[in-house]
Every structure is written in C-alpha cells, then in structure tokens.
Image (tube, rainbow, N blue to C red):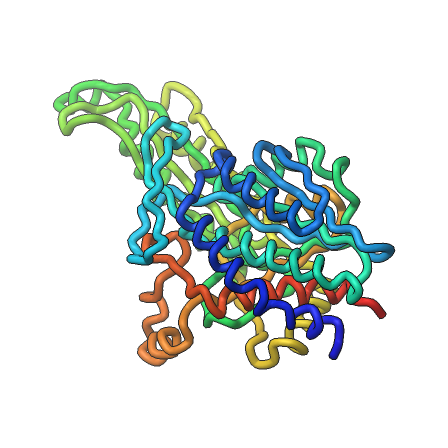
Amino acid sequence: MGSLEEILAGYDGLQAGQEAFYKDLHRHPELSHQEHRTAERVAGKLQEYGCTVQTGIGGTGVVGVLANGAGPTVLLRAELDALPVKEDTGADYASTATAKDTQGHEVPVAHACGHDMHMSCLLGMVKLMSDHRDQWSGTVLPLFQPAEETGDGAQAMVDDGLLARIPVPDVALTQHLLSGIAGTVLTRSGPFMATEDSINITVYGKGGHGAIPQHTIDPVVLAAMAIVRLQTIVSREVAPGEIAVVTVGSVQAGTRSNLIPDHALLELNLRSYSEQTHERMLASVQRIVRAESLASGSPRDPDFDTVGSFPLTVNDPATTERAASAFAAYFGDHAGEIDRQTVSEDFSNIPNAAGVPYTYWALGFTDEKTYRAAEKAGRLQDLTSNHSPKFLPPLQPCLRTGTEALTTAALAWLARK
C-alpha cells in the first residue's frame, strides 16, 4: 500500500465527526468580515490536530502550520464566509441565521456556495496528515481566508503581514464546488476564472420639469446612450474568440415620470480572461461614458467608483499537470477537465504575493442520476447552482471526495520518496 492509500484508509474513522462539524458550520453561517465563530471553530480543530495556529490575520483569517521534517511547504486554502441568502433546502440542518450587512440591514445568511464543505474537507485532510506523519515529509499550511465573497479577504491577509508570519510556501492549492457530477475532480490549466470589476458610474445632467425638457440636460437619455455603446466593447473592440462580458446590472435615476433628474447611476460588471483585455475594457468604459457625457452637454465629468475587484485566476501549467496526474491515478474516470469559468475569485492574491505557483480545481456537487437526466434533456441550466437558496451538495460523496482531493494533491509534493 502506498503513502496515499495508507493515509486515505483513515477516512472512515473521521467521517462521522467531519459530517457533524460540517452541519454545525452550515447551521451557523457568517457574512464576510464577520466570521468570528467560524474562525474560532476552525482554529480549535487545527490545534486539536497538532497545528501551530495563528488567528486574526486580515480580520478573521486563520492559518495552521503542520511541520513534519524537511521537504516542500504546501499551502491549502479554504474560505470562512457565507452569503446573504435565505436558505430553502429543507435540510434538517438548514440555516435560519440572520445578520446585519454593511448597510446595517438585517439579512438572512446561508452557506450557499459550499465554503462550509471546503473548510470541513481541509480540516479532514489536516487530521489525516497529522495521523500519518510517517507517510510524508515537509510542511502543510492550512489557510482559512475571510471575505472571499467580497473579493478582499485574501489581500487583507497579505496586507496584514501573512507572508512574514508563516513559512514561505513552495506551492498553493485550493478547490471549489462547481457545476458537475458529485464525486468528480476537474482541473484546468491556464486561465480558469475571470477577472472581475464592479464599477458604479454616475453621469450628470440638469434637472427640471418633464414638460419643458429643452431647459434640462436629461441624464436618463445620457445613461441610455452610454449603455447601448458599452455593449459594443465586446462586439467591436474585443477580438473574436476572446471571452469578455460587460453587464449593466442596475440603472437608477429619478423619482417620478414628470421630473427630469440631475444624475443617473449605472452599476457595471466586467469580466475577462486576460489582463490585456481587462485593461482595454476599463479604458473603453471611461472613454465611452466620458464621450457620451460630452455629447449630451453634461455640466460635469462622470464619476467612476470601483466598488469591487477580483484578480484573474491563471493556473500554473506545471503545477496543474502535477495535480491532475495525481488525480487521474487515484480517481480514475472521476478525474477530468473543466471549461473556463466566468465566476471570479481572489485566492490568487496570496500565491501571487508570495511569488509561488498555484492551481485551483473543481469538485462536482450534483447527484449523478440528476445530472445525467438534465444532460440528456438538454436542461443543465435548470440544475441548482452556487448562490441559489436551494444549494445543498450531498454530504457524500462530496466530503470524502474533497478530502481525498486535497490529500492527493498535497502528497504530489510531500510523499516520502
């Protein structure tokens, strides 16, 4: 029996405790930057499993160090936070939690993206590695990041001196539940998740009575013209075959039909898979909105406020190949490839700051029978997705697969020769 098989043979002994811990996290979700109970629970488990633990990094971030002699240092990331979503799964461990958001509004909270499962899998992996130190050599760094959903948690940890407080990793690894069959592990080399910017743009006019529009400068018309032209960024400025998305998700102006307002607010979301396209899109947005403001005779320049930003996730080819080969050897037909995703992540801020390679893979979460039926009917879009009130991955095989995947990938660097 090899090192991997020897270690993973211990999974049955931790399964019941892992499932109970997952259900506890699921019942008690916490919003971004508020993950105090979650961080405390995670830190306690890391200490129980023999890690040296640091807490409060970047707010509520937690890092463990499981040192086991000479060898590579492998960082593995999971996320602490949940979403302002009202759960509608019917599970007996469903969340009924509420919390105040950044605007002070009381909102429902649920783990509708799988972060509770990611944490449980990483803790399970740490226990397995701690219980089988004779099978590997090196250092495991389990890192639990706050505020992934808001896109600023990873950078907050970096800015708070993360890399001066832990051993420098040789490689960084992470995983996420994404659309696919439960029990599958899916990799992608190169660009994997899109860069994202959320931008609030305010354009200005001159308000007045709707009956005398000639005495006004209508920001609603200005905004409408800008929205139309913004759509030409993808169709006329981005090269065919290069994926890019420009969405105007919200437009707010005025209070009633016979009042022309003095400003309008546009909320944009931009996504792309290359820094070159990303920079061109940002420049194009500025050019178009400024030009439309000038054409409308706007009394002042528009305001641009970037309210959220996620970096590009680009999986290192050599690192991805090493992990994918290990997955293929262990999972067989349940290992495969996944298409690029237009969702976004901030994980890469950590390995980028450390100057180390990384790879990020996917775990399927849909029951195979359900998935195959939807696939046959051409209705995959009807399946429950991340961020849905009905998002609830099956306990098994998801917890086992996620734990096995983290262990398999880490041992591609740490297994004794």
> As drawn, is 278 to the left or to the right of 173?
left
Foreground: 104 or 309?
104
Of the 4 image quadrants, the one containing the N terminus is bottom right
Foreground: 99 or 207?
99
Q: Residue at x 82, y 67 (%)?
A: 416
Residue 37 image offset from top left, x and y in percent = 50, 38
Q: Residue at x 51, y 72 (%)?
A: 183
Residue 203 image offset from top left, x and y in percent = 37, 27
Q: Is residue 88 visible in this depiction of the protein?
A: yes
Residue 174, picture quadrant: bottom right
> As drawn, is 398 to the left or to the right of 50?
left
Q: Is residue 284 visible in this depiction of the protein?
A: no
> As drawn, is 279 to the left or to the right of 25?
right
> As drawn, is 333 to the left or to the right of 27?
right
Q: Residue at x 41, y 29 (%)?
A: 102
Of the 4 image quadrants, the one containing the C terminus is bottom right
Q: Residue at x 32, y 32 (%)?
A: 106
Residue 164, picture quadrant: top right
Residue 198 image offset from top left, x and y in percent = 46, 39
Foreground: 413 or 62?
62
Residue 258 image offset from top left, x and y in percent = 14, 25
Foreground: 205 or 143?
143
